[in-house]
Structure formats: structure tokens, C-alpha cells
Image: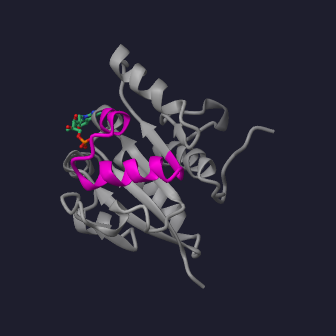
């Protein structure tokens, strides 16, 4: 059986552990193949916010790309994927996607995802938000295939730990991609 490809991109906003939570859940879906690209900012936050080395982080994916390699397969619309999740997504990356300024592989892959009308989920993180951030996100949210999904705590799930919070947010992110995860607490 051919696996479905999903692109996971990590940019330099706070929240690198959310990418870990998403990839660990995606690994349980053996029909999916994780294609990972990390920006320079993402490498920095992985170092600050997780206990993993960059190599350990990359090993959570099936395929890992160099962000400078703008000729990689995910840079082409002819390379089929189910869509892309940018988790976490910095305001710089939001701005790059919004303006179609694709000067690295992550931005090019996002641009391709938009133009091919595939699902693009942006786990956009900054606080407080400036009018520039809000304008860019508002514009992107009007594109039918783009979901702006800030990593916001759901208190109703009564989290006991950071791990619970990350798991719940990963559930929301993967739900938006049409992928169900075990132990996701829905409102009843
Ligand atoms: C520890 C750390 C946390 C950061 N958190 C955020 C954040 O939450 N949101 C954001 O937009 N930028 C944040 N930044 C700044 C971005 O990393 C910076 O703007 C970078 O140029 C983004 O580039 P990239 O989107 O290509 O990764 C953070 C930087 C560091 C070092």
C-alpha cells in the first residue's frame, strides 16, 4: 500500500514540543508518511524548547529535507501530498506565505500547498498580535484550503500537565487535517 504523504514544517515560533506531539501521533497512522522541513528559526526553538538533538528530532519523520534545498520534491506541485502543517508557525513565516515570498523550502512547500489547493494548517503563534500579524492571518484564513490554528489551551479538557496540553492541541491540529488521535477529549 502506498502511504499518504503529509508535510510537517517547523518554524521559529515558540512551540517546538507541539511538532513532537504531532509527529508521535502521526507515527501511529501507518498509512501516513511524514515529510519534515525545519527552518533555521525552528532549529533554534527545538534546541531551546525540547530535550532532543536535531538528529533525534528529525528521526521522528520518515523523510527530512534541508530548508535550503529549494529543488527538493516537496517544492513541486507534481509531488503529491495530502497537505501541510506548519507547527509552530512564526509571524515571519506567516508573512512569507501571505506574500508568496518563497525564499526557502518551507515557504516554497507552503506556497505549493496553497496553489495546489491542498490543506494548509498554520499553528500560528505570537502574543500579543500586531495589526500586521492579524492582517496577514486574516488574508490567509480567507483562502478556503488554509486553516489558522493558534495553539490555544482548552481548559475544559482539564489538563494536568504540559504533556496533556500538547496532546490536546496536537489533537486539534490533526483533526483539522482529518486525522483522528487516541485519547482526544471532545466536548460532550
Ligand atoms: C526561543 C524563541 C522563541 C520565539 N518565539 C516566537 C514566536 O512565538 N512567534 C514568532 O513569530 N517568532 C518567534 N521567535 C522569532 C522567530 O524565530 C524569528 O522571527 C525567525 O526569524 C523566524 O524565522 P522562520 O519563520 O524562518 O523560522 C522566537 C525566537 C526564539 C529564539
In the rendered image, the vertical position of residue 125 relative to residue 184, given as above or below: above
Displayed quadrant of residue 154: top right
Q: Residue at x 59, y 44 (%)?
A: 172
Along the line of sight, which residue is nearer the eye, 10 or 100?
100
In the image, farthest residue toward the bottom: 1
In the rendered image, the vertical position of residue 89 relative to residue 182, given as above or below: above
Q: Residue at x 33, y 51 (%)?
A: 10
Residue 48 part of the magenta-drawn span = no
Q: Which is the main secondary structure of the residues drawn in magenta?
A: helix
In the image, farthest residue toward the top: 131
The x, y position of residue 188, in whole percent, is 81, 39
The x, y position of residue 156, in whole percent, is 67, 32
The x, y position of residue 35, in whole percent, is 40, 66
- Where ligand 1 lies, by image quadrant? top left
Residue 98 part of the magenta-drawn span = yes
In the rendered image, the vertical position of residue 50 relative to residue 99, given as above or below: below
In the image, farthest residue toward the right: 188
Residue stretch in magenta: 95-120
Can residue 54 be seen by looking at this rendering? yes
Can residue 130 be seen by looking at this rendering? no
Quadrant for the N terminus in the image: bottom right
Amino acid at each position: 500500500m502506498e502511504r499518504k504523504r503529509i508535510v510537517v514544517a517547523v518554524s521559529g515560533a515558540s512551540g517546538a514540543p507541539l511538532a513532537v506531539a504531532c509527529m508521535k501521533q502521526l507515527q501511529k497512522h501507518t498509512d501516513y508518511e511524514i515529510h519534515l522541513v525545519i527552518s533555521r528559526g525552528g532549529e533554534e526553538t527545538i534546541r531551546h524548547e525540547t530535550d532532543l538533538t536535531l538528529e533525534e528530532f528529525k528521526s521522528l519523520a520518515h523523510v527530512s529535507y534541508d530548508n535550503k534545498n529549494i529543488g527538493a520534491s516537496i517544492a513541486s506541485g507534481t509531488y503529491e501530498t495530502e497537505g501541510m502543517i506548519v507547527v509552530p508557525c512564526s509571524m515571519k513565516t506567516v508573512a512569507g506565505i501571505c506574500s508568496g515570498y518563497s525564499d526557502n523550502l518551507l515557504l516554497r512547500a507552503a506556497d505549493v500547498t496553497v496553489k495546489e489547493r491542498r490543506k494548509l494548517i498554520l499553528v500560528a503563534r505570537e502574543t500579543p498580535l500586531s495589526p500586521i500579524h492579524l492582517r496577514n492571518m486574516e488574508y490567509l484564513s480567507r483562502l478556503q484550503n488554509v486553516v489558522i490554528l493558534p495553539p490555544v489551551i482548552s481548559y475544559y479538557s482539564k489538563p494536568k500537565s504540559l504533556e496533556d496540553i500538547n496532546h490536546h492541541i496536537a489533537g486539534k491540529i490533526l483533526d483539522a487535517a482529518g486525522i483522528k488521535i487516541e485519547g482526544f477529549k471532545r466536548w460532550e
